[in-house]
Image (spheres, rainbow, N blue to C red):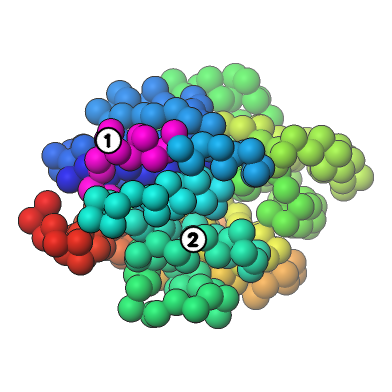
């Protein structure tokens, strides 16, 4: 089977990482994996795994991007994929319109994944035009049904899988730990609370600082790590975080690490991972990655985060936006000797791959290609 995944670019991010990981799984199973994007630093990783990349400027949210419809149509005619998998709205518009211009008997199967609960408008509706839709959680499925006229039979819920072998079977490298403590000696002999995610107001970093201020009053041996790059380069929010850290007298207790590509090691290094988004998230990949590393998570009970924790570590759930409850839960989890963490099969990368391939085969069967 020849599969073409389509997304804006291959920089850091959950969708990007999931695309690259899924492409690697396709190659392992003997399929031809292609990715169409505007490029980015993850292209090298993609190619090293045996997949192929095609670069076209399909990422900008601009009417000018529709000028790529003809090049994409030529690509589809030359590549002849069996399946196109849409993963983002602007590239979906370009690819869908190119796909529609192909003769009906030569169109590949068309699948889209709703990675988020997008604003409900005509622009977002393109994701509902595919022949079959994948929702990354039950709350995303409910959003699709509430927002668009979609037959429930056209939607499959497939959680974003984690390569548990990578996270659980690879212990923390002593050299990595040594280098981290040499670079950040303030972390030595401290219990670490990790707050991963893009620096954005709704991700909850300000609330995390409030939690840390409460925790360190009773335990001076705690340290918070905020990991993530600025969303859209919003330097003013970074300045606001630094000002709040100083006002709460947390300079010795909270460190901003910026964007990192060593999340596996950071999950293993941490004692607790915190998830404090102020609005429902569609899935919450950081939760399942942290839990797969054996590190417990404390999170507000909303959206996809609640689904993940209810399945894997319900002890870590906190009522939404309740800072007092979050502080008490963090204290309780830090005191656990062996947290009881379970990763159900549906949250594993192998299960995601097989479920997605099953959707591909269903769509191809409708095209009369059941034996692809």
**371 lies left or right of 172:** left
- Camera-nearest residue between 81 and 283: 81
Q: Position of residue 101 (x, y in %)?
A: 39, 50
Disc number placed over residue 127 in the picture, else none: 2
Region rendered in magenta: 71-84
* Total marks placed: 2
Q: Which residue is pictured at 13% across the width and 57% down the height?
A: 369
Which of the 4 quarters of the picture holds residue 169?
top left
Residue 118 appears in view: no
**146 lies left or right of 184:** left
For label 1, the crowd category at 10 Å Cα-Cα, with few meaning under 14, some 14 to 19 and many 20 or more, is: few
- Camera-nearest residue between 338 and 196: 196
Q: Position of residue 135 (x, y in %)?
A: 43, 66
Q: Position of residue 29 (x, y in %)?
A: 15, 43
Determine which residue is flagged by label 1: 79
* Prevalent SS, magenta region: helix
């Amino acid at each position: 089977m020849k599969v073409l995944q389509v997304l804006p670019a291959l920089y850091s991010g959950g969708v990007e990482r999931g695309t690259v990981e899924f492409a690697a799984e396709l190659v392992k199973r003997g399929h031809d994996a292609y990715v169409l994007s505007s490029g980015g630093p993850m292209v090298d990783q993609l190619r090293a795994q045996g997949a192929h990349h095609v670069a076209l400027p399909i990422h900008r949210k601009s009417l000018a991007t529709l000028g790529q419809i003809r090049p994409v149509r030529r690509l589809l005619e030359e590549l002849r994929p069996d399946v196109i998998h849409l993963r983002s709205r602007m590239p979906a518009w370009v690819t869908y319109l190119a796909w529609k211009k192909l003769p009906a008997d030569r169109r590949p199967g068309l699948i889209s994944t709703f990675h988020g609960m997008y604003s409900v408008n005509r622009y977002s509706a393109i994701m509902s035009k595919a022949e079959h839709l994948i929702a990354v959680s039950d709350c995303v499925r409910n959003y699709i049904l509430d927002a668009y006229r979609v037959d429930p039979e056209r939607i499959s819920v497939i959680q974003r899988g984690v390569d548990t072998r990578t996270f659980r079977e690879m212990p923390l490298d002593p050299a990595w730990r040594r280098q981290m403590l040499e670079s950040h000696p303030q972390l030595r002999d401290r219990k670490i609370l990790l707050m991963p995610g893009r620096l954005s107001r709704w991700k909850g970093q300000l609330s995390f600082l409030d939690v840390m201020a409460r925790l360190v009053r009773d335990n001076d041996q705690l340290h918070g790590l905020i990991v993530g790059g600025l969303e859209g380069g919003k330097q003013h929010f970074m300045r606001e975080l630094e000002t709040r850290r100083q006002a709460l007298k947390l300079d010795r207790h909270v460190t901003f690490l910026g964007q990192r590509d060593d999340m596996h090691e950071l999950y293993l290094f941490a004692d607790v991972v915190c998830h404090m988004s102020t609005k429902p998230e569609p899935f919450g990949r950081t939760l399942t990655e942290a839990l797969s590393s054996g590190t417990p998570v404390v999170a507000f009970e909303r959206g996809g985060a609640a689904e993940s924790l209810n399945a894997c570590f319900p002890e870590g759930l906190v009522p939404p936006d309740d800072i007092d409850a979050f502080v008490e839960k963090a204290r309780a989890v830090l005191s656990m000797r062996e947290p009881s963490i379970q990763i159900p099969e549906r949250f594993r990368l192998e299960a995601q791959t097989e479920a997605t391939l099953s959707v591909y085969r269903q769509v191809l069967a409708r095209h009369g290609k059941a034996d692809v």
